[in-house]
Every structure is written in structure tokens, then in C-alpha cells.
Image (cartoon, rainbow, N blue to C red):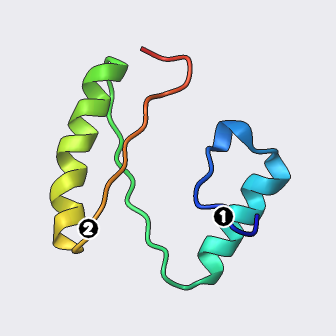
Amino acid sequence: MPGQRRWHFTNERDSRRKQIIGDLVATGQVQSLVYYGRGGETLIRAACVRALVPDLLDRQVARLTIESREGGP
């Protein structure tokens, strides 16, 4: 919404989620990286972050924000 600086998908309706993603894609500046693994959730998340950080540095990303999962350990 106007003036909104951040959002959390768990707090958004499906229609709003689609709007947010659509608006991001429409900028033409969105890229995606997909990391996939098998095993325990916590171990896989840690492995994905270890793989993600060097990839972000290669792309000169200046900020990475990691928030806790709602309702998760």
C-alpha cells in the first residue's frame, strides 16, 4: 500500500500476495534463486543459507534480511 515499507506474506490476503509479486516482476529487475534440499528442515535451511550468501555477494546484493518463521522453531 502507499507508504508501506515492508510486508509479511502471512499477514496478506492471496489477492494482495499476487499483486505484490506481479508488481515486483513488472519492474523487470527481479531475479530468483532456488535452493532445494532433502533432510531435516533446520539442517536444510542452514545449508541453503550457506549456499545463498556467496551467490548474493557475487550479485553485489548489499542487504539480506532473515526473519524468524512464524510458528516454527
Q: Dot 1, crowdedness within 10 Å: few (<14), some or many (≥20)?
A: few
Q: Amino acid at mark 1?
A: Ile
Residue 45 image position (x, y, % from top left): 31, 32
Which residue occupies the foreground of this view, 56 or 68? Answer: 68
Q: Amino acid at mark 2?
A: Ala
Residue at horizontal 31 percent and vertical 21 percent from the top: 42
Q: Is residue 13 left or right of residue 10?
A: right
Quadrant containing the N terminus in the rendered view:
bottom right
**Above or below: residue 67 compared with residue 34:** above
Residue at the far bottom in the pictured view: 28
Element under disc 1: helix
**Residue underneath mark 1:** 21
Percent from the top left, x then y, of residue 50? Answer: 17, 43
**Picture coordinates of residue 19 (x, y %)?**
77, 64
Q: Which residue is mark 2?
A: 62
Q: Residue at x 84, y 54 (%)?
A: 15
Q: Which residue is drawn at the image coordinates 61% and 75% (left, top)?
A: 25
Q: Quadrant of the C terminus?
A: top left
N-term mark: 2 or 1 = 1
